[in-house]
Image (cartoon, helix red, strand yellow):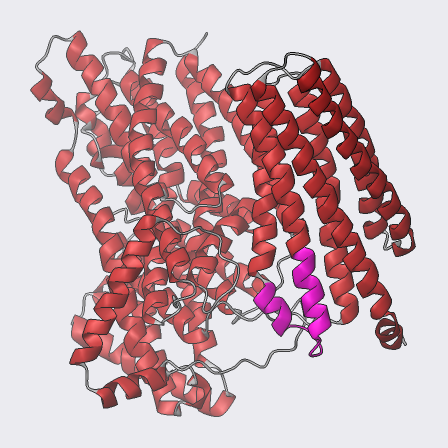
Amino acid sequence: MGDPYILMLIALAVLAILDLVVGVSNDAVNFLNSAIGSKAIPIRKIMIIASVGVFFGAISSSGMMEVARKDIFNPEMYMFQDIMIIFMAVMITDILLLDVFNSLGMPTSTTVSIVFELLGSAVIIALIKIYGGSQNLSELWSYINYTTATKIIVGIVLSVVVAFSVGAIVQYFSRLIYSFNFSERPTYVNALFGGFALTSIIYFIIIKGLKQTPFYADIKYILDYDITILIGTNFFVWTLVSFLLIKLLKVNILKLIIGVGTFSLAMAFAGNDLVNFIGVPIAALNSYQIWSASGQDALNFSMGILAEPVRSNLWLLLIAGAIMVVTLWTSKKARSVIETGINLSRQGEGHEKFQPNNVSRVVVRMAMATNVGLNFLIPEKTQKYINSKFEKPTLSLPRDKNNQPPAFDLVRASVNLIMASVLISIATSMRLPLSTTYVTFMVAMGTSLADRAWGRESAVYRVAGVIKVIAGWFLTALIAFIAAAIVASMIHVSLYFIILFLAAIAFLVTRTTIQHSKKAKEEKQQQYVERAELISINGVIEESSDHISNVASRVSKLYNNVVSDLSNHDLNKLRKTDKNVGKLNNEIDDLKDGVYYFIKSLEEDSVEASKFYILTLGHLQDVAQAIGFVARASYRHVNNNHKNLKKGQIKDLLTINAQLKELLNKMSEAFQNRSFDYLEDILIEKRELLANVARSIEKQVARIRAEESSPKNTTLYFSILLETQDLISALMSLLQLYQEFHLTTKDIRDELDK
């Protein structure tokens, strides 16, 4: 096998690149959410600003590399081979874990994952050494740097509470100062806010960040001057600069803050989180260099030297920064994670990604009760004054599909960036690998709550989403610890397991990438009607035609699958079909949830168009529910191990399926091509199909009276036929409705076309 450690270093280098890609896909949400959500700056400029920030952050991150070397475990207790196994297990686990979360579009913490992976692999290797050396179990504490590890873990947990609380408090008072009509605020208010924001960013990002670089020695005498005078001078200078920019150049200071804040948060992210991606491989490289120079056996060479400080190679940091920047520009998974954060902090209503649960309902009820209690304590005049500051103006945007309103305004975006930058930078200066995901996400959630973004219509969904994300974080810690321990123990048994794990990574990452791409395409096809769209009568025709064509095509496939899988008694395929039917029902429910926005978006006050669209969705829901009942009943029948359907029953179902498939495909094609002249022919064929279903019911009645038959089979067969009858009837009603609407609005549409 030659030198296995050289091969492990090569593998770690490849894994480091892959970890940078999946890690940035997860963490891009941390510094892009606010700028993208507020639409303060074009996305291209946001990406350029963030890219520059990442490069600067990469240079200032070298001091954080100590976390991977000595902050979680005591390196002097481990031999070189032990260290390499620990590092290998950490990187393998980290990539698999992050890729799964990215594919789900859920932000998780790279800091938490790396800390608990180091802890899990170090603990299992320590236990193996203790068991093999007949030591006492209490010796485990000498292997683990529990003081620093506990400090890091407690800091991460506290960051959730601190970030949420600080974000909520600062946003509340910022809104009282600015209100939602921030464009009408006096110049001095904007200048003072700009001075505070820029001072915070400059001090905590530039000054604190420089402490981790070789340049700090040259300016140390300036930065070590009286801190009060330094901050006070900065505040005066930046307030004056803000005032001049606003007064003379008419600069929107909030947009400037968002730009600088995006840069600073990207820099803080790279400075704090780069260790999560390349800290372990760099530590492995240093370990190998030290060991190979010693000439000792890998099983007997203690790695206590890792406890000594070492400065990372600047070129390696810059290469890592370059990979992170490329990932920012190209990762589709990053966009999914960003959408989750923006969706949960969005101002106002719309399509909700998460479903409510009992916990979110209880939390919302408790918050409402608390709010009622507070209203008794606050004087009525004070309440009116506060409420006036939170009154949202009506946005007059061009009503265009491509011109969606921002998720939140510039004030909230500025607070998000300022507070997240400050908190992360404080932690970085203290060499604490604070979770940037936890901080930025919880700051955004705190500002959303304080800004009254979670109203009665959306609170239960948003709270459910936050709970789900936080639960995912704690699950990350548990999974990371256990998975890293398992991987490390297997590699300890045989280094050949590394090859197996690398193959598994290649397979799973490729598979999840393909699945994510496929899922993104499916979601792109779904039509969610947003409040900024303008819909004409022709738009109603186009919108509903697309829905009908899509549903007809999918129902055709689903019904065919049910009949085929039922005839083969294939439980696994029936289970898959049942899940796909569930997706169809959920999509139609989402469309019905958007009816309010659809009606508001109609170009004219057309009651007929609104009624037509509502009835169309109702018929589509009837169709989806019918196929859902057929799929569920069939799956339940086979899952309960009941007897197969009789040959005669299967034959009748196959005949009905063939006719239904042909008609649904014709229907899908007609609506896709807008060939509405053929609807009458399809209606005639559907009547013939209904007659065929009725004859099948009569034949089954005759079978029961003439021969012995299974009661369960009879129940299932009648259920399928009756639901098929309902399905066909719903389709007939839909076609008749469409035919009538198409004829009655012909004159209006012809006039619009002119």
Magenta region, residue range: 595-617
* 32 sits to left or right of 451: right
Compared to residue 24, the image places residue 713 above or below, namely above
Residue 36 horizontal/vertical position (percent): 51, 63
- Locate the C terminus by quadrant: bottom right
Compared to residue 672, the image places residue 661 above or below, namely above
User: Which residue is nearer to you in this view: 26 or 593?
Assistant: 593
Q: Residue at horizontal 39%, vertical 67%?
A: 456
Residue 708 horizontal/vertical position (percent): 64, 12
* 402 sits to left or right of 258: right
Compared to residue 354, the image places residue 305 above or below, namely above
Q: Residue at horizontal 61%, vertical 51%?
A: 588
- Of all residues, the one furthest to the front in this rendering is 705
* 516 sits to left or right of 360: right
Based on the picture, tell me whether residue 105 belongs to the magenta stretch. Answer: no
User: Which residue is nearer to you in this view: 240 or 474?
Assistant: 474
